[in-house]
């Protein structure tokens, strides 16, 4: 009968170690059923699950492997696996896999303990943990560096909503971001990223900046805040705020546009998405004057936003055409998906306000970014502690994939 054995090798990593071990196995014509290798700070951990065609041949295989390990100065451990146990393990491989992504400025043992404890509390077993952010030099840390680790587990949580709620509570308590998503074909096959503009792609609400220049800053900011929390009808509140801008000189729009503060990670995100040939769009309840400025500056493909009426070089206090509210955002996203000939599951939508929720709910991956509480609780994922480039990690990209970085 065939014999199944796990070989675990650990020790100092060096070139040719894996080649040497597997060369000895090759001499005995064994089959490799599974293999995994990881290196942390030059320390190797190598696991090889082998099938020896005849049990009577196992002694020479183990003897040669033990000799090879001794020669290489590494530790080796052999564990026999019953056939029934192996077959049961294989059947588990068909189950749905989920990815939990931890994003923070620095990862601590408390973060790992909390996340792994929540997963274990739902009777789920982690089968892989991977660092996907680059290593950070202790004496030369990078500005705004991200730290990211992925946890992988198989199976369906019995209570997915409770699991998400526990992750959200933990993330809030520890000041980190935790995302849970199914590891499917769409995760690394996104084709379109649609971004809200105000308080998402840029740090400010443009209408509030305009209102300050029109002498109505406090009144308009209060309405904006309430509208973003979902307490006011967006269309009515927008028209009311725009009325406060009547008489504002068009030159003010140009000045504000040229000084818009981009959100941390925005340029890195857009630059990388362009490099990957993904389509990008601004779908905003703000104004197209500023969206088009960002389109030219960053190389964004599409802009959909409201249009301020300007007459004789001054803002009239009116919005032209149909207002881009929450429902319109979702409609525009659906139209763009159809135009691009892609699936909605290939779309990422990002926003911070209640008016973004219809768009976020339709996208394959909806991300609440530094969002109001109602949006964080309703959206599938959220990023609060990190910049916009954190989206790239949720897509499965590593630092050495991302433009301008090394892993």
Image: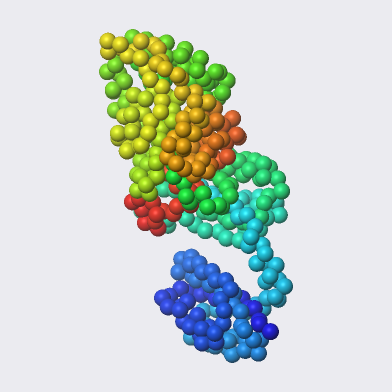
Residue 290 image point, x, y percent: 35, 26
On-image quarter of the C terminus: bottom left
Q: Residue at x 41, y 25 (%)?
A: 305
Nearest to the observer: residue 275 or residue 176: 275
Q: Residue at x 46, y 46 (%)?
A: 190
Residue 298 image point, x, y percent: 32, 37
Q: Quadrant of residue 372?
A: top right
Across the whole image, how many numbered discs are drawn on residues? 0
Residue 345 image point, x, y percent: 52, 43
Colour style of the rendered protein structure: rainbow
On-image quarter of the N terminus: bottom right
Residue 149 image point, x, y percent: 52, 54
Report whether 180 appears left or right of 198. Answer: right
Nearest to the observer: residue 92 or residue 367: 92
- Determine if residue 259 is in view: no
Report whether 33 appears left or right of 89. Answer: left
Task: Give above or below for 116 relative to 77.
Answer: above
- Determine if residue 324 is in view: yes
Report whether 269 appears left or right of 369. Answer: left
């Amino acid at each position: 009968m065939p014999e199944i054995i796990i070989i675990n090798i650990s020790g100092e990593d060096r070139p040719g170690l894996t080649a040497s071990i597997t060369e000895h196995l090759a001499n005995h014509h064994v089959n490799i059923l599974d293999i995994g290798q990881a290196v942390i700070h030059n320390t190797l951990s190598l696991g090889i699950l082998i099938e020896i065609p005849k049990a009577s041949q196992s002694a020479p295989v183990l003897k040669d492997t033990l000799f090879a390990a001794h020669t290489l100065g590494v530790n080796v451990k052999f564990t026999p696996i019953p056939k029934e146990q192996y077959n049961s393990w294989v059947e588990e491989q068909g189950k749905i896999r989920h990815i939990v992504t931890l994003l923070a400025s620095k990862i601590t043992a408390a973060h790992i303990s909390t996340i792994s404890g929540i997963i274990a509390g739902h009777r789920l077993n982690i089968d892989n943990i991977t660092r996907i952010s680059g290593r950070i030099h202790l004496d030369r840390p990078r500005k705004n560096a991200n730290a990211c680790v992925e946890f992988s587990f198989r199976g369906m949580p019995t209570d997915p909503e409770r699991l998400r709620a526990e992750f959200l509570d933990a993330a809030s308590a520890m000041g980190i971001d935790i995302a849970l998503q199914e590891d499917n074909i769409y995760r690394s096959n996104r084709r379109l990223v649609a971004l809200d503009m105000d308080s998402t792609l840029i740090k400010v609400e443009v209408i509030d900046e305009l209102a300050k220049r029109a002498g109505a800053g406090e009144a308009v900011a209060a309405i904006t805040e309430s509208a973003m929390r979902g307490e006011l009808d967006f269309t009515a509140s927008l028209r009311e705020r725009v009325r406060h801008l009547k008489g504002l000189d068009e030159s003010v729009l140009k000045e504000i546009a040229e000084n818009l503060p981009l959100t941390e990670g925005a340029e890195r995100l857009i630059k990388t998405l362009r490099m990957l040939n993904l389509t990008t769009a601004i779908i905003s309840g703000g104004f197209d004057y500023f969206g088009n400025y960002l389109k030219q500056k960053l190389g964004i493909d599409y802009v959909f936003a409201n249009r301020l009426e300007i007459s004789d070089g001054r803002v009239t206090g009116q919005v032209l055409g149909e207002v881009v509210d929450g429902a319109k955002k979702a409609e525009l996203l659906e139209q763009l998906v159809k135009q691009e000939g892609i699936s909605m599951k290939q779309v990422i939508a990002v926003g911070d306000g209640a008016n973004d929720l219809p768009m976020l709910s339709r996208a394959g991956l909806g991300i609440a970014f530094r969002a109001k509480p109602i949006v964080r609780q309703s959206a599938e994922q959220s990023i609060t502690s990190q910049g916009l480039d954190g989206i790239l990690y949720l897509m499965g990209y590593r630092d050495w994939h991302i433009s301008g970085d090394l892993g």
